[in-house]
Image (spheres, helix red, strand yellow):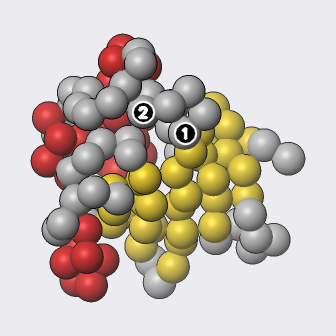
């Protein structure tokens, strides 16, 4: 059953423990989703194509393919709110530095 979680109007727990959650992140495509894995005091935000890189997320602007850039920016802002409230490693698919952030547990912080 969907519930609100961390600034997202809906979230969909995948596991009974709630340590794997799917959240809607529209923008790249209308029904794009991301997966949050909660483990060892950190969250890992498997972002897919919400932004192509961490840097683009931090710039808070649409990049790449997006049919509705305003929706993309609203999603990016929602992700940044989440990252500001929860220690999270942000892992977009196309960012070559995602592997380093994952390996090192490097937390992403957005400016408010």
Could you say where residue 104 lies in the image, as x and y percent from the top left? 22, 83
Task: Residue under label 2, please give it.
Answer: 28
The residue lying at 34 percent from left, 18 percent from top is 69
Q: Residue 50 versus residue 74: which sits nearer the camera? A: 50
Tag 2 near tag 1, CB within 8 Å: yes
The residue lying at 27 percent from left, 57 percent from top is 94
Q: Is residue 28 above or below residue 6?
A: above
Task: Residue under label 1, please give it.
Answer: 32
Could you say where residue 77 lies in the image, as x and y percent from the top left? 34, 31
The residue lying at 42 percent from left, 53 percent from top is 47
Could you say where residue 86 lies in the image, as x and y percent from the top left? 40, 57
Q: Quadrant of the C terminus?
A: top left
Q: Which mark is residue 85?
A: none
- The answer to whether residue 45 is left or right of residue 112 is right
The answer to whether residue 37 is visible is yes
Could you say where residue 48 lies in the image, as x and y percent from the top left? 43, 53
Q: Residues within 10 Å of mark 1 (few under 14, many from 20)?
A: some
- The answer to whether residue 93 is left or right of residue 25 is left
The residue lying at 33 percent from left, 56 percent from top is 92
Q: Quadrant of residue 19?
A: bottom right
Q: Is residue 85 above or below residue 79?
A: below
Q: Residues within 10 Å of mark 2 (few under 14, many from 20)?
A: many
Q: Secondary structure at mark 2?
A: loop
Q: Secondary structure at mark 1?
A: loop
The answer to whether residue 75 is visible is no
Q: Is residue 111 above or below residue 55?
A: above
């Amino acid at each position: 059953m969907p519930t609100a979680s961390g600034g997202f109007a809906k979230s969909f727990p995948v596991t009974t423990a709630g340590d794997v959650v799917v959240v809607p992140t529209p923008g790249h495509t209308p029904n794009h989703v991301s997966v949050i894995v909660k483990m060892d005091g950190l969250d890992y935000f498997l972002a897919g194509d919400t932004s192509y890189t961490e840097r683009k997320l931090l710039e808070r602007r649409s990049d790449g393919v997006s049919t509705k850039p305003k929706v993309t920016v609203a999603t990016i802002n929602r992700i940044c709110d989440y990252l500001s409230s929860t220690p999270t490693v942000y892992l977009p698919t196309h960012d070559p530095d995602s592997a380093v952030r994952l390996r090192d547990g490097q937390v992403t912080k957005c400016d408010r």
